[in-house]
Amino acid sequence: TPDRPATLIKVGEITPPGESPRLTGGSVHPEGLGVLLRNHTQVLLYAMRPEQTVAQALGGVPCVFAADATKGEAITWLPRGEGFVTVSEGAGASMMLTRCPGPR
């Protein structure tokens, strides 16, 4: 609800695969079809079924692929879920657009 505090409840932990376990960003697909997580060197895509919670989706095995640049910081789905945008750390960092049909 806008303008109202939200209480977060820990429902689990995640250890991302690969050499860089520190997560720097994440985004849930606008239609609930997947979860993107980002670390400094990789993008992790966790497929999500309509009946699943985000926590349940994150319990699955991700599709892992190399990110656009080192020191990746942020990631978000485009509004209709047809791709995502990432940005790296530092002043003047470029935004990178990846178009894809999204998880189905």
Image (cartoon, grey):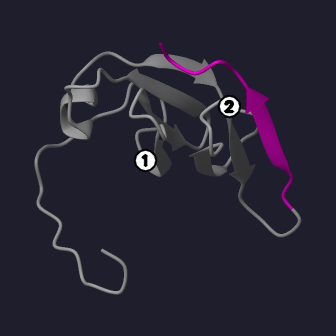
Label of residue 91 in the image: none
Left or right placement of residue 93 versus residue 50 in this view: right
Question: Which residue lies under the disc numbered 2?
Answer: 83
Residue 90 location, x and y as percent?
77, 65
Q: Nearer the viewer, residue 65 or 85?
A: 85
Q: Is residue 53 above or below residue 27?
A: above
Q: Nearer the viewer, residue 80 or 16?
A: 80
In magenta stretch: residue 4: no
Residue 42 location, x and y as percent?
58, 31
Q: Is residue 2 above or below residue 24?
A: below
Residue 70 location, x and y as percent?
71, 42
Q: Residue at x 36, y 31 (%)?
A: 16
Mark 2–mark 1 distance (CA, rounded to whole Å): 23 Å
Q: Amino acid at mark 1?
A: Arg
Q: Residue at x 40, y 39 (%)?
A: 21
Q: Amino acid at mark 2?
A: Gly
Q: Residue at x 22, y 75 (%)?
A: 6
In magenta stretch: residue 96: yes
Q: Does the image show residue 38?
A: yes
Magenta-colored span = 93-104
Question: Which residue lies under the disc numbered 1?
Answer: 22
Q: Residue at x 29, y 20 (%)?
A: 49
Q: Residues within 10 Å of mark 1 (few under 14, many from 20)?
A: few
